[in-house]
Image (cartoon, helix red, strand yellow):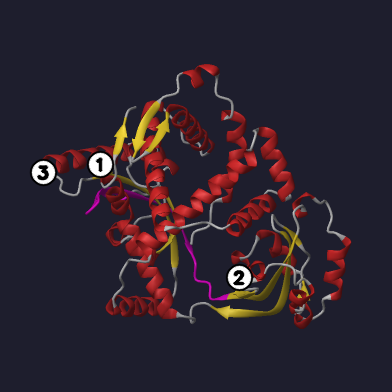
Protein backbone atom coordinates (compact mmCIF):
# COMPACT_ATOMS: atom_id res chain seq x y z
CA UNK A 1 0.00 0.00 0.00
CA UNK A 2 1.22 3.42 -0.92
CA UNK A 3 2.50 5.41 2.03
CA UNK A 4 0.88 8.68 3.00
CA UNK A 5 2.96 11.57 1.67
CA UNK A 6 4.76 13.04 4.68
CA UNK A 7 5.78 16.19 2.81
CA UNK A 8 2.24 16.84 1.67
CA UNK A 9 0.78 16.30 5.12
CA UNK A 10 3.39 18.44 6.80
CA UNK A 11 2.34 21.43 4.71
CA UNK A 12 -0.69 21.39 6.98
CA UNK A 13 1.46 23.52 9.29
CA UNK A 14 1.40 26.26 6.67
CA UNK A 15 -2.28 25.82 5.91
CA UNK A 16 -3.26 26.02 9.57
CA UNK A 17 -1.65 29.45 9.82
CA UNK A 18 -3.17 30.76 6.62
CA UNK A 19 -6.68 29.36 6.70
CA UNK A 20 -7.75 28.62 10.26
CA UNK A 21 -9.61 31.86 10.95
CA UNK A 22 -12.50 32.52 8.57
CA UNK A 23 -13.96 35.98 8.89
CA UNK A 24 -17.30 36.74 10.48
CA UNK A 25 -18.68 37.47 7.02
CA UNK A 26 -17.61 34.01 5.83
CA UNK A 27 -19.44 32.39 8.71
CA UNK A 28 -22.59 34.42 8.12
CA UNK A 29 -22.64 33.63 4.40
CA UNK A 30 -22.06 29.88 4.82
CA UNK A 31 -24.39 27.77 2.72
CA UNK A 32 -24.74 24.34 1.16
CA UNK A 33 -22.89 24.04 -2.16
CA UNK A 34 -23.43 20.31 -2.74
CA UNK A 35 -25.35 17.31 -1.42
CA UNK A 36 -23.69 13.89 -1.75
CA UNK A 37 -26.24 11.19 -0.92
CA UNK A 38 -27.19 12.39 2.58
CA UNK A 39 -24.05 14.43 3.30
CA UNK A 40 -23.69 18.15 2.62
CA UNK A 41 -20.70 20.24 1.55
CA UNK A 42 -20.59 23.78 2.92
CA UNK A 43 -19.30 26.90 1.17
CA UNK A 44 -16.81 27.49 3.99
CA UNK A 45 -15.29 24.01 3.57
CA UNK A 46 -15.03 24.47 -0.19
CA UNK A 47 -13.36 27.88 0.15
CA UNK A 48 -10.88 26.58 2.72
CA UNK A 49 -9.97 23.57 0.58
CA UNK A 50 -9.63 25.80 -2.48
CA UNK A 51 -7.22 28.11 -0.66
CA UNK A 52 -5.25 25.10 0.62
CA UNK A 53 -5.00 23.68 -2.90
CA UNK A 54 -3.94 27.04 -4.32
CA UNK A 55 -1.25 27.31 -1.63
CA UNK A 56 0.02 23.81 -2.42
CA UNK A 57 0.12 24.54 -6.16
CA UNK A 58 1.99 27.81 -5.61
CA UNK A 59 4.53 25.96 -3.44
CA UNK A 60 5.20 23.81 -6.55
CA UNK A 61 5.56 26.96 -8.70
CA UNK A 62 2.28 26.21 -10.49
CA UNK A 63 0.40 29.52 -10.86
CA UNK A 64 -3.36 29.66 -10.28
CA UNK A 65 -4.93 31.98 -12.83
CA UNK A 66 -8.61 31.15 -12.42
CA UNK A 67 -9.86 30.53 -8.87
CA UNK A 68 -13.37 29.76 -10.09
CA UNK A 69 -12.14 26.87 -12.25
CA UNK A 70 -9.96 25.66 -9.39
CA UNK A 71 -12.90 25.81 -6.99
CA UNK A 72 -15.01 23.67 -9.32
CA UNK A 73 -12.28 21.02 -9.53
CA UNK A 74 -11.77 21.09 -5.76
CA UNK A 75 -15.50 20.53 -5.28
CA UNK A 76 -15.30 17.51 -7.59
CA UNK A 77 -12.45 16.15 -5.44
CA UNK A 78 -14.42 16.71 -2.22
CA UNK A 79 -17.39 14.86 -3.69
CA UNK A 80 -15.21 11.91 -4.71
CA UNK A 81 -13.60 11.83 -1.24
CA UNK A 82 -17.04 11.76 0.41
CA UNK A 83 -18.23 8.98 -1.88
CA UNK A 84 -15.13 6.91 -1.18
CA UNK A 85 -15.49 7.40 2.60
CA UNK A 86 -19.16 6.44 2.41
CA UNK A 87 -18.28 3.31 0.45
CA UNK A 88 -15.55 2.43 2.97
CA UNK A 89 -18.07 2.75 5.81
CA UNK A 90 -20.49 0.47 3.97
CA UNK A 91 -17.73 -2.15 3.69
CA UNK A 92 -16.76 -1.77 7.36
CA UNK A 93 -13.20 -0.67 6.55
CA UNK A 94 -11.29 0.98 9.40
CA UNK A 95 -7.87 2.46 10.11
CA UNK A 96 -6.27 1.51 13.42
CA UNK A 97 -4.68 3.97 15.83
CA UNK A 98 -1.39 2.11 15.37
CA UNK A 99 -1.41 2.76 11.61
CA UNK A 100 -2.06 6.47 12.18
CA UNK A 101 0.57 6.69 14.92
CA UNK A 102 3.21 5.14 12.67
CA UNK A 103 2.60 7.86 10.10
CA UNK A 104 2.71 10.58 12.77
CA UNK A 105 6.06 9.31 14.06
CA UNK A 106 7.47 9.31 10.52
CA UNK A 107 6.30 12.90 9.94
CA UNK A 108 7.75 14.11 13.24
CA UNK A 109 11.13 12.42 12.85
CA UNK A 110 11.45 13.38 9.18
CA UNK A 111 11.09 17.00 10.21
CA UNK A 112 13.51 16.60 13.15
CA UNK A 113 10.85 16.87 15.84
CA UNK A 114 9.55 14.69 18.59
CA UNK A 115 5.91 13.70 18.40
CA UNK A 116 5.24 15.97 21.37
CA UNK A 117 6.87 18.95 19.60
CA UNK A 118 4.82 18.28 16.47
CA UNK A 119 1.62 18.11 18.50
CA UNK A 120 2.41 21.31 20.42
CA UNK A 121 3.30 23.22 17.28
CA UNK A 122 0.12 22.18 15.48
CA UNK A 123 -2.06 23.00 18.49
CA UNK A 124 -0.33 26.35 18.89
CA UNK A 125 -1.21 27.29 15.32
CA UNK A 126 -4.84 26.21 15.58
CA UNK A 127 -7.14 24.69 18.21
CA UNK A 128 -7.16 20.91 17.73
CA UNK A 129 -4.51 21.19 15.01
CA UNK A 130 -3.02 17.83 15.95
CA UNK A 131 -6.45 16.17 15.72
CA UNK A 132 -6.91 17.76 12.29
CA UNK A 133 -3.67 16.17 11.11
CA UNK A 134 -4.68 12.78 12.53
CA UNK A 135 -7.99 13.02 10.68
CA UNK A 136 -6.23 13.83 7.40
CA UNK A 137 -3.97 10.79 7.80
CA UNK A 138 -6.92 8.58 8.78
CA UNK A 139 -8.83 9.65 5.66
CA UNK A 140 -5.90 9.02 3.31
CA UNK A 141 -5.24 5.55 4.74
CA UNK A 142 -8.95 4.67 4.62
CA UNK A 143 -9.20 5.59 0.95
CA UNK A 144 -6.05 3.56 0.22
CA UNK A 145 -7.66 0.52 1.85
CA UNK A 146 -10.85 1.06 -0.15
CA UNK A 147 -8.96 1.22 -3.45
CA UNK A 148 -7.06 -1.92 -2.51
CA UNK A 149 -10.28 -3.81 -1.82
CA UNK A 150 -12.52 -2.38 -4.53
CA UNK A 151 -10.09 -2.07 -7.44
CA UNK A 152 -6.71 -3.74 -6.96
CA UNK A 153 -7.80 -6.97 -5.25
CA UNK A 154 -10.63 -7.52 -7.76
CA UNK A 155 -8.40 -7.20 -10.79
CA UNK A 156 -8.07 -10.62 -12.42
CA UNK A 157 -4.73 -11.90 -13.68
CA UNK A 158 -4.45 -14.84 -16.09
CA UNK A 159 -1.73 -17.50 -16.23
CA UNK A 160 -0.78 -16.31 -19.71
CA UNK A 161 -0.25 -12.75 -18.42
CA UNK A 162 1.94 -14.05 -15.58
CA UNK A 163 4.07 -16.18 -17.91
CA UNK A 164 4.48 -13.33 -20.39
CA UNK A 165 5.44 -10.94 -17.61
CA UNK A 166 8.05 -13.32 -16.18
CA UNK A 167 9.49 -13.96 -19.63
CA UNK A 168 9.84 -10.24 -20.34
CA UNK A 169 11.21 -9.64 -16.86
CA UNK A 170 13.98 -12.20 -17.29
CA UNK A 171 14.95 -10.68 -20.63
CA UNK A 172 14.99 -7.16 -19.23
CA UNK A 173 18.34 -6.53 -17.56
CA UNK A 174 17.82 -2.79 -16.98
CA UNK A 175 14.55 -2.18 -15.21
CA UNK A 176 13.70 1.50 -15.46
CA UNK A 177 11.19 3.58 -13.56
CA UNK A 178 9.42 6.54 -15.11
CA UNK A 179 7.94 9.67 -13.56
CA UNK A 180 4.93 10.78 -15.57
CA UNK A 181 2.43 13.63 -15.62
CA UNK A 182 -1.04 13.02 -17.02
CA UNK A 183 -3.96 14.97 -18.52
CA UNK A 184 -7.28 13.17 -19.01
CA UNK A 185 -10.37 14.44 -20.83
CA UNK A 186 -13.09 11.95 -19.91
CA UNK A 187 -15.93 10.51 -21.97
CA UNK A 188 -19.30 9.29 -20.66
CA UNK A 189 -19.68 5.50 -20.76
CA UNK A 190 -22.12 5.76 -23.70
CA UNK A 191 -20.66 8.81 -25.38
CA UNK A 192 -22.36 10.22 -28.48
CA UNK A 193 -20.37 11.11 -31.56
CA UNK A 194 -20.80 14.79 -30.69
CA UNK A 195 -19.38 14.23 -27.20
CA UNK A 196 -16.41 12.34 -28.65
CA UNK A 197 -15.69 15.13 -31.13
CA UNK A 198 -15.89 17.80 -28.40
CA UNK A 199 -13.52 15.84 -26.15
CA UNK A 200 -11.12 15.18 -29.04
CA UNK A 201 -11.17 18.88 -29.96
CA UNK A 202 -10.38 19.84 -26.34
CA UNK A 203 -7.45 17.40 -26.01
CA UNK A 204 -6.04 18.53 -29.38
CA UNK A 205 -6.23 22.14 -28.25
CA UNK A 206 -4.34 21.25 -25.06
CA UNK A 207 -1.70 19.41 -27.11
CA UNK A 208 -1.17 22.53 -29.23
CA UNK A 209 -0.88 24.73 -26.14
CA UNK A 210 1.72 22.36 -24.70
CA UNK A 211 3.67 22.45 -27.95
CA UNK A 212 3.58 26.25 -27.69
CA UNK A 213 5.33 26.05 -24.34
CA UNK A 214 2.49 26.25 -21.79
CA UNK A 215 2.96 24.48 -18.46
CA UNK A 216 1.81 20.85 -18.40
CA UNK A 217 1.20 21.05 -14.64
CA UNK A 218 -0.94 24.17 -14.92
CA UNK A 219 -3.04 22.78 -17.76
CA UNK A 220 -3.52 19.52 -15.83
CA UNK A 221 -4.82 21.42 -12.81
CA UNK A 222 -7.24 23.45 -14.94
CA UNK A 223 -8.54 20.88 -17.41
CA UNK A 224 -7.65 17.29 -16.50
CA UNK A 225 -10.36 15.04 -15.06
CA UNK A 226 -7.82 12.48 -13.84
CA UNK A 227 -7.54 11.59 -10.15
CA UNK A 228 -4.15 13.37 -9.90
CA UNK A 229 -5.22 16.63 -11.56
CA UNK A 230 -4.75 18.74 -8.44
CA UNK A 231 -1.11 17.65 -8.14
CA UNK A 232 -0.41 18.88 -11.66
CA UNK A 233 -1.18 15.43 -13.08
CA UNK A 234 1.84 13.90 -11.30
CA UNK A 235 1.53 10.08 -11.37
CA UNK A 236 4.77 9.63 -9.40
CA UNK A 237 7.36 6.96 -10.16
CA UNK A 238 6.05 3.93 -12.07
CA UNK A 239 7.77 0.77 -13.17
CA UNK A 240 7.26 -0.35 -16.75
CA UNK A 241 4.93 -3.08 -15.51
CA UNK A 242 2.73 -0.53 -13.69
CA UNK A 243 2.21 1.82 -16.61
CA UNK A 244 -1.26 1.47 -18.17
CA UNK A 245 -1.12 -0.57 -21.38
CA UNK A 246 -2.44 2.23 -23.58
CA UNK A 247 0.40 4.50 -22.38
CA UNK A 248 3.16 2.03 -23.22
CA UNK A 249 3.43 2.65 -26.98
CA UNK A 250 3.24 6.43 -26.54
CA UNK A 251 5.94 6.32 -23.86
CA UNK A 252 8.30 4.34 -26.08
CA UNK A 253 10.73 6.78 -27.66
CA UNK A 254 9.81 9.75 -25.45
CA UNK A 255 12.73 11.68 -23.98
CA UNK A 256 12.49 13.33 -20.55
CA UNK A 257 10.58 16.60 -20.93
CA UNK A 258 8.64 15.47 -24.01
CA UNK A 259 4.84 15.12 -24.29
CA UNK A 260 3.13 12.21 -26.02
CA UNK A 261 0.70 12.39 -28.92
CA UNK A 262 -2.99 12.16 -27.99
CA UNK A 263 -3.84 8.72 -26.56
CA UNK A 264 -7.33 7.20 -26.76
CA UNK A 265 -8.71 4.76 -24.17
CA UNK A 266 -12.13 3.60 -22.88
CA UNK A 267 -12.04 6.35 -20.24
CA UNK A 268 -11.33 9.20 -22.70
CA UNK A 269 -8.37 11.00 -24.26
CA UNK A 270 -4.95 11.37 -22.59
CA UNK A 271 -1.69 13.27 -22.83
CA UNK A 272 1.35 12.15 -20.85
CA UNK A 273 4.64 13.87 -20.19
CA UNK A 274 7.81 11.96 -19.34
CA UNK A 275 9.30 14.06 -16.54
CA UNK A 276 12.33 11.87 -15.85
CA UNK A 277 13.49 8.25 -15.76
CA UNK A 278 15.86 6.26 -13.57
CA UNK A 279 17.49 2.84 -13.42
CA UNK A 280 15.84 0.79 -10.68
CA UNK A 281 17.78 -2.44 -11.21
CA UNK A 282 18.57 -3.17 -7.56
CA UNK A 283 18.88 -6.81 -6.56
CA UNK A 284 20.08 -7.07 -2.98
CA UNK A 285 18.35 -5.37 -0.06
CA UNK A 286 19.21 -5.52 3.63
CA UNK A 287 16.45 -7.01 5.78
CA UNK A 288 16.09 -7.04 9.55
CA UNK A 289 14.31 -9.74 11.59
CA UNK A 290 12.61 -7.79 14.37
CA UNK A 291 10.49 -8.42 17.43
CA UNK A 292 8.39 -5.74 19.12
CA UNK A 293 7.02 -5.21 22.61
CA UNK A 294 4.89 -2.25 23.80
CA UNK A 295 4.90 -1.12 27.44
CA UNK A 296 1.74 0.90 27.92
CA UNK A 297 2.03 4.52 29.10
CA UNK A 298 -0.38 7.40 28.74
CA UNK A 299 2.31 10.09 28.69
CA UNK A 300 5.30 8.60 26.87
CA UNK A 301 5.27 11.25 24.14
CA UNK A 302 5.21 14.02 26.77
CA UNK A 303 8.42 12.89 28.49
CA UNK A 304 11.71 14.49 27.45
CA UNK A 305 13.76 11.45 28.55
CA UNK A 306 13.28 7.71 28.69
CA UNK A 307 12.27 6.70 32.26
CA UNK A 308 14.91 4.89 34.33
CA UNK A 309 12.86 1.69 34.59
CA UNK A 310 12.57 1.49 30.77
CA UNK A 311 16.31 2.17 30.42
CA UNK A 312 16.99 -0.66 32.88
CA UNK A 313 14.88 -3.06 30.83
CA UNK A 314 16.98 -2.21 27.77
CA UNK A 315 20.21 -2.71 29.71
CA UNK A 316 19.07 -6.07 31.11
CA UNK A 317 17.79 -7.53 27.83
CA UNK A 318 20.68 -9.34 26.18
CA UNK A 319 18.95 -12.16 24.28
CA UNK A 320 15.76 -12.93 22.41
CA UNK A 321 14.63 -15.25 25.22
CA UNK A 322 14.94 -12.41 27.73
CA UNK A 323 13.04 -10.13 25.36
CA UNK A 324 10.20 -12.66 25.06
CA UNK A 325 10.02 -12.92 28.84
CA UNK A 326 8.74 -9.32 28.91
CA UNK A 327 5.29 -10.74 28.14
CA UNK A 328 5.40 -12.61 31.45
CA UNK A 329 6.90 -9.71 33.36
CA UNK A 330 4.14 -7.37 32.13
CA UNK A 331 1.29 -9.86 32.30
CA UNK A 332 -1.17 -7.07 33.16
CA UNK A 333 -0.85 -5.61 29.63
CA UNK A 334 -3.79 -6.86 27.50
CA UNK A 335 -2.68 -9.67 25.21
CA UNK A 336 -3.93 -7.94 22.06
CA UNK A 337 -1.48 -5.05 22.55
CA UNK A 338 1.49 -7.30 21.81
CA UNK A 339 -0.08 -9.76 19.41
CA UNK A 340 2.07 -10.63 16.41
CA UNK A 341 5.18 -9.33 18.14
CA UNK A 342 7.40 -11.21 15.68
CA UNK A 343 7.51 -8.71 12.80
CA UNK A 344 9.46 -11.02 10.51
CA UNK A 345 11.90 -9.70 7.91
CA UNK A 346 11.61 -5.97 7.19
CA UNK A 347 13.56 -3.49 5.09
CA UNK A 348 14.30 -0.01 6.44
CA UNK A 349 11.57 1.43 4.21
CA UNK A 350 8.97 -0.73 5.95
CA UNK A 351 9.88 0.43 9.46
CA UNK A 352 9.02 3.50 11.57
CA UNK A 353 11.34 6.35 10.64
CA UNK A 354 12.56 6.77 14.21
CA UNK A 355 13.86 3.17 14.25
CA UNK A 356 15.94 3.37 11.07
CA UNK A 357 19.02 5.11 12.46
CA UNK A 358 19.05 2.85 15.52
CA UNK A 359 19.08 -0.26 13.33
CA UNK A 360 22.08 0.96 11.35
CA UNK A 361 24.05 1.12 14.60
CA UNK A 362 22.64 -2.12 16.06
CA UNK A 363 24.16 -5.62 15.92
CA UNK A 364 22.08 -8.84 15.89
CA UNK A 365 20.77 -9.95 19.28
CA UNK A 366 20.56 -6.39 20.58
CA UNK A 367 17.66 -4.23 21.67
CA UNK A 368 17.11 -0.77 20.17
CA UNK A 369 16.55 2.43 22.10
CA UNK A 370 12.88 2.79 23.15
CA UNK A 371 10.55 4.86 20.95
CA UNK A 372 7.76 6.95 22.48
CA UNK A 373 4.33 6.47 20.91
CA UNK A 374 0.72 7.27 21.72
CA UNK A 375 0.35 3.80 23.26
CA UNK A 376 3.52 3.91 25.31
CA UNK A 377 7.16 2.84 25.00
CA UNK A 378 7.88 0.62 21.99
CA UNK A 379 10.84 -1.79 22.26
CA UNK A 380 12.40 -3.48 19.22
CA UNK A 381 14.77 -6.46 19.39
CA UNK A 382 16.97 -7.22 16.38
CA UNK A 383 17.36 -10.98 15.98
CA UNK A 384 19.20 -11.19 12.65
CA UNK A 385 20.26 -9.24 9.54
CA UNK A 386 20.48 -10.59 6.00
CA UNK A 387 21.01 -9.48 2.40
CA UNK A 388 18.05 -10.60 0.33
CA UNK A 389 17.75 -11.01 -3.44
CA UNK A 390 14.36 -9.52 -4.18
CA UNK A 391 14.52 -10.43 -7.89
CA UNK A 392 14.52 -14.17 -7.21
CA UNK A 393 12.05 -14.26 -4.35
CA UNK A 394 8.37 -14.83 -5.00
CA UNK A 395 8.68 -14.04 -8.71
CA UNK A 396 5.19 -15.22 -9.50
CA UNK A 397 3.60 -13.26 -6.65
CA UNK A 398 5.48 -10.15 -7.72
CA UNK A 399 4.27 -10.67 -11.27
CA UNK A 400 0.66 -10.99 -10.12
CA UNK A 401 0.89 -7.81 -8.05
CA UNK A 402 2.61 -5.84 -10.82
CA UNK A 403 0.05 -6.88 -13.44
CA UNK A 404 -2.78 -6.19 -11.01
CA UNK A 405 -1.43 -2.69 -10.28
CA UNK A 406 -1.08 -1.93 -13.99
CA UNK A 407 -4.64 -3.01 -14.70
CA UNK A 408 -5.92 -1.14 -11.64
CA UNK A 409 -4.23 2.04 -12.86
CA UNK A 410 -6.06 1.60 -16.15
CA UNK A 411 -9.49 1.17 -14.52
CA UNK A 412 -9.30 3.40 -11.45
CA UNK A 413 -10.71 6.53 -13.10
CA UNK A 414 -13.55 4.46 -14.57
CA UNK A 415 -14.31 3.05 -11.08
CA UNK A 416 -14.38 6.55 -9.60
CA UNK A 417 -16.75 7.78 -12.31
CA UNK A 418 -19.04 4.79 -11.80
CA UNK A 419 -19.05 5.40 -8.04
CA UNK A 420 -20.23 8.95 -8.70
CA UNK A 421 -22.77 7.93 -11.35
CA UNK A 422 -24.43 5.56 -8.89
CA UNK A 423 -24.69 8.22 -6.17
CA UNK A 424 -27.08 11.14 -5.64
CA UNK A 425 -25.03 14.31 -6.19
CA UNK A 426 -26.71 17.72 -6.21
CA UNK A 427 -24.29 20.59 -6.93
CA UNK A 428 -25.58 23.99 -5.84
CA UNK A 429 -22.47 26.04 -6.47
Could you classify mark 2 by the number of other residues whose Cα lies within 10 Å: few (under 14), some (14-19), or many (20 or more)?
some
Q: Can you say whether 12 is above or below 394 in the image?
A: above
Circle on res. 347:
2
| Rendered location of residue 54, percent (x, y) | 48, 33
Judge by depth and name the residue closer to the eye, 165 or 348: 348
Whether tag 1 and tag 3 are in contact, CB under 8 A, the answer is no
Q: Is residue 271 magenta?
A: yes
Question: Label 1 vs label 3: CA separation?
Answer: 15 Å
Question: Which segment did they paint magenta?
Answer: 260-284
Residue 243 in the image: x percent, y percent? 36, 61
The count of marks equals 3
Q: Residue at x 34, y 75 (%)?
A: 165
Residue 222 visible within the image: no
With respect to residue 342, does 149 lie above or below?
Answer: above
In the image, residue 225 lies at what x, y percent? Answer: 32, 43
**Callout 1 touching callout 2 (CB < 8 Å):** no
Q: Is residue 406 visible?
A: yes
Q: Which residue is mark 3?
A: 193
The answer for how far apart the CA atoms under marks 1 and 2 are is: 43 Å
Nearer-N-terminus badge (1/2)? 1
Whole-angstrom CA distance, mark 3 to mark 2, is 52 Å
**Mark positioned earlier in the residue sequence (3 or 2):** 3
Left or right position of 248 against 39: left
Amino acid sequence: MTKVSNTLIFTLLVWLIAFSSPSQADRLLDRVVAVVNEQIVLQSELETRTRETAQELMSQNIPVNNLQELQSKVLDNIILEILQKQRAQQLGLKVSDEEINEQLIQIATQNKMSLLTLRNRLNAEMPNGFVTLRNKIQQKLLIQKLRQQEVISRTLVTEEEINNYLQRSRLDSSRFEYRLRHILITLPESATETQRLEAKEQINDLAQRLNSGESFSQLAVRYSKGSKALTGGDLGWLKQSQIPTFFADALDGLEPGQVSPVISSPSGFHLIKLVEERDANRQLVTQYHLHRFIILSDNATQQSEVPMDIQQIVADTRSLDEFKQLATRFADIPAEVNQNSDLGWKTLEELPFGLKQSLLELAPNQIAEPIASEQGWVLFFLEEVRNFDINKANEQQQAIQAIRMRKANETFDIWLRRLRDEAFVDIRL
